[in-house]
Image (cartoon, rainbow, N blue to C red):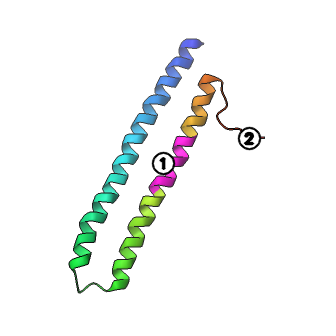
Amino acid sequence: MEQQMRMAKQAMDMQRVAFTGMINNMILFWDQTEKMFGTYLEKAAWIPDDGKKAFREWVDGNKKGCETYKNAVDDGFNRLGSCFTGKSQHSDTV
């Protein structure tokens, strides 16, 4: 039984690393997109201010969504990890 638990924990750790790499790359993508198009938008006089504002809101919303998703999955990994250690990491459960 101990070996199966260790293997399951290793699989979970591997999934955590894969997820963290993927989400960090996604956030990096949004940062690069914002920088690249932000510079372009600043210099594009033909784009109305409403269009520039919509772009900024779109990028900010996507970045915030990525962060929220990352935090939720990290919380799930932490809760699952507590199953392997036998310790409860959250005292907010009734």
| Quadrant in the picture for the C terminus | top right
| Quadrant in the picture for the N terminus | top right
Q: Residue at x 37, y 41 (%)?
A: 21
Q: Residue at x 54, y 13 (%)?
A: 3
Helix, strand or loop under label 1: helix
Residue nearest the observer in this picture, 93 or 1: 93
* Placement of 34 over or under 15, stated as above or below: below
What is the magenta range? 66-75
Toward the top, the furthest residue is: 2
Mark 1 Cα shell of 10 Å, populated few (<14), some (14-19), many (≥20):
some
* Placement of 3 over or under 47, stated as above or below: above
Helix, strand or loop under label 2: loop
Label at residue 93: 2
Amino acid type shown at disc 2: Thr
To which quarter of the image does residue 34 belong? bottom left
Amino acid type shown at disc 1: Lys
Report the residue marked by disc 1.
70
* Placement of 91 over or under 52, stated as above or below: above
* Placement of 92 over or under 83, stated as above or below: below
To which quarter of the image does residue 35 belong? bottom left
Q: Is residue 57 left or right of residue 46?
A: right
Q: Is residue 13 left or right of residue 39?
A: right
Q: Is residue 44 left or right of residue 21?
A: left
Q: Residue at x 34, y 84 (%)?
A: 49
Q: How many marks?
A: 2
Residue 73 lies in magenta, yes or no?
Answer: yes
Could you tell me if the residues under marks 1 and 2 are in contact, i.e. CB atoms within 8 Å?
A: no
Q: Residue at x 63, y 27 (%)?
A: 83
To which quarter of the image does residue 53 belong? bottom left
> Which secondary structure is most common in the magenta stretch?
helix
Tell me residue 38's x, y (percent). 28, 70
Tell me residue 39's x, y (percent). 23, 71
